Image (tube, rainbow, N blue to C red):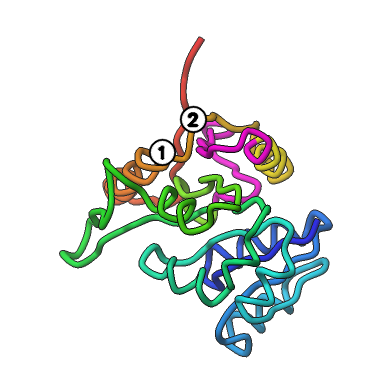
Amino acid sequence: MKVGILGSGEVGRALGKGFAARGHDVKLGSRNTKSKELLAWLKDTKGRASTGSPKEAAAHGEVIVLAVLGAAVDDAIDLAGRENFDGKVVIDTTNPLDFSKGMPPGLFVGTTDSLGERIQRRLPKAKVVKCFNIVGNASMVDPNLPGGPPDMMIAGDDAAAKTRVTGILKEFGWPGSIDVGGIDGSRWLEASVPLWVRVCSAVGDWNIAWKALHK
């Protein structure tokens, strides 16, 4: 599978390494492909990995991962070219975190709208699936926690796209996914992240993930 990743921060690099390690052809898009972080990522990543512009990464991927700061989503889509998303599964990892008042963060959009919904509206021909936004980058691939495998919750309007993303989660070591419904479910996945930050701060550990306990 060809994967285009928009965003060269810790989330993009972690997911890119995970895809490449499993035999996928990854292109990580950035406005600065010569940064020391990206050069180190290329050196350390096993498998088929390359870097390019946001537009090159989006054109490359049959699956596209949005892994940018929430405030940068619109710019990332514009740089990538909206036509490059048409018909593709778009994994949306973003969160609308607002740090204007310091820690812990709030949300710059929430409860009546979400970044997931905004992205789907901007990319009406894409199949957007909210995923990976509820955990830290260290737990996104091969999550290994003392309490056992955590649960990943996803949201999106296209059932086939969610099935495909669930397959990717299983490749990455997750037991599967909990489907919370349409893309409007992003409102609640995104809203859980400020709580996640508070929990991490309270216990002094950023390697925290959710698990639904049931009979």
- Outermost residue, bottom direction? 34
Tell me the residue that label 2 is attached to: 181
* Quarter of the image with the N terminus in it: bottom right
Whether residue 131 appears in this view of the structure is: yes
The answer to which of 146 and 86 lies nearer the viewer is 86
Quadrant assignment, res 112: top left
Q: Are marks 1 and 2 in contact (CB under 8 Å)?
A: yes
Quadrant assignment, res 80: bottom right
Q: Is residue 72 left or right of residue 152?
A: left
- Outermost residue, top direction? 215
Circle 1 SS class: helix
Question: The disc labelled 2 sits on which kind of residue?
Answer: Gly
Question: The disc labelled 1 sits on which kind of residue?
Answer: Asp
Residue at 58%, 65% (x, y): give it: 12
Q: Is residue 195 left or right of residue 135?
A: left
Q: At which x and y percent is residue 137?
A: 52, 56
**How many residues crowd around disc 2 within 10 Å: few (fewer than 14), some, or many (20 or more)?**
some
Residue at 41%, 38% (x, y): give it: 184
Q: At which x and y percent is residue 123?
A: 53, 57
- Does the segment drawn in magenta span residue 146? yes
Tell me the residue that label 1 is attached to: 184
Above or below: residue 109 compared with residue 112: below
Q: In the image, which residues are magenta?
A: 139-162
